[in-house]
Image: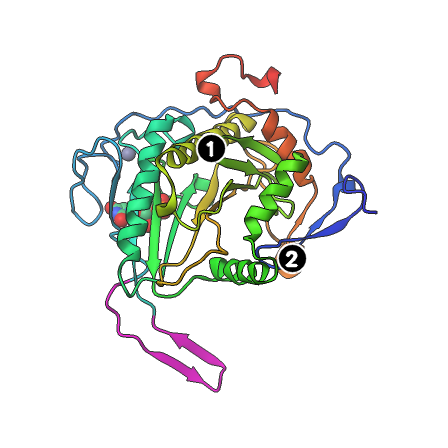
Amino acid sequence: MTNFDLDPHRRLNILTGDWVLVSPHRTQRPWQGQTENINIGTRPAHDPNCYLCSGNERAGGVKNPSYESTFSFDNDFAALLPDTLDSESNVNDLLVSHIESGVCRVICFSPRHDLTLAEMSVSEIRKVVDLWQEEYLKLGSDDSINYVQIFENKGAVMGCSNPHPHGQVWAQRSIPCEPNRELRRMRQHFNKNDSPILIDYLELEMSLKERIVYTNKSFAALVPFWATWPFEVMVLPKRQISNLTEMEDQEKTELADVLRAVTAKYDNLFQTSFPYSSGIHQAPTDGMDYPDCTFHMHFYPPLLRSSTVKKFMVGYEMLGGPQRDITPEYSAGVLRELPDIHFKNDKICNSESL
Ligand code: H2U
Ligand code: ZN
């Protein structure tokens, strides 16, 4: 029987089929609760030089409207272009390519340059959820769009170009690699068990409790059993929902609540504006039914020990596969215990209370 706290072991990522190497013995006390470089930072509510702030001019010369909650627009430097002619090329199965078409959008979460999801209210985040739904519906209804990838890249360390709270939507003809791998595994499980893999998984996690970080009536946030990043989190609905359009009004508000809680806990962990890449995986928009695919969100944050010490996916990870020292159970315990009220709004949450 594996001792998950001591023995090096591999864990299966049931969504991708990959394995992660867990080496808990490498460190007796992985994290001692110290915080450093408290990086509260001050930004103006409106920055005249920000291309995402309301009323400002963007790089291409277009002026943003004076928006008051959320705002989305076509990316001025889009990675995908619509209306490309479909064509394939293949040289001896060695040089294989396929023309891709699509649309890239940028979504501003708030007109406030100085906020992030972590500091926004549930009702403000709810407007972001509504916009995600609108974009998914609108972009996905185009016959040439088969997948709508919604994501957020937050923090300079993640290559984010602007601290203004924003995310992106890339909608394209093909299903991208990551969701495609997951969809295959979801279908396999459904065919075998007649139930969606993530619904079965969440049921098990809710009974075990050790990896649960936060729950409300409709959603749960947990550190997956196979998490790769030190404080990776997955957000799952408690009932089968394959995409954003299937959510009831109350569920959209509860999704906003779980996003607020996870991002506030993240900021509280090292008392910093916690960087991450996050995104939604949901049903493709290719006109097929996906009873096996459960809407979910991934949060992949790079930080390991402090606001400045990040995990590098290098060496063995690049050549062999992902590896971690602190266990997902340990990380989940730390995140669970942290307040879900942002430290800037809560005087009780200071470095001593960590
Ligand atoms: P990131 O911060 O994650 O890099 O996203 C910002 C996006 O905003 C990026 O894709 C786009 C960039 O192309 N952008 C515009 O569409 N217009 C601008 O004026 C600047 C940046
Ligand atoms: Zn701004």
Label 1 sits on a secondary structure element that is helix
Q: Label 2 belongs to which residue?
A: 321
Question: Mark 2 near ligand 1 (CB under 8 Å)?
Answer: no
> In the rendering, which numbered label is found on residue 258?
1
Q: Position of residue 48 (x, y in %)?
A: 22, 32
What colouring does the structure picture have? rainbow
> What residue sits 24% from the left and 35% below the top?
53
Q: Is residue 311 visible?
A: no
Q: Which residues are magenta?
A: 81-99
Type of residue at label 2?
A: Gly
Q: Position of residue 181 (x, y in %)?
A: 52, 61
> What residue sits 28% from the left and 65% below the top?
143
> In the rendering, which numbered label is found on residue 169?
none
Residue 302 sits in quarter: top right
Give whichever of discs 1 and 2 has the lower sequence position. Answer: 1
Q: Is residue 51 left or right of residue 149?
A: left
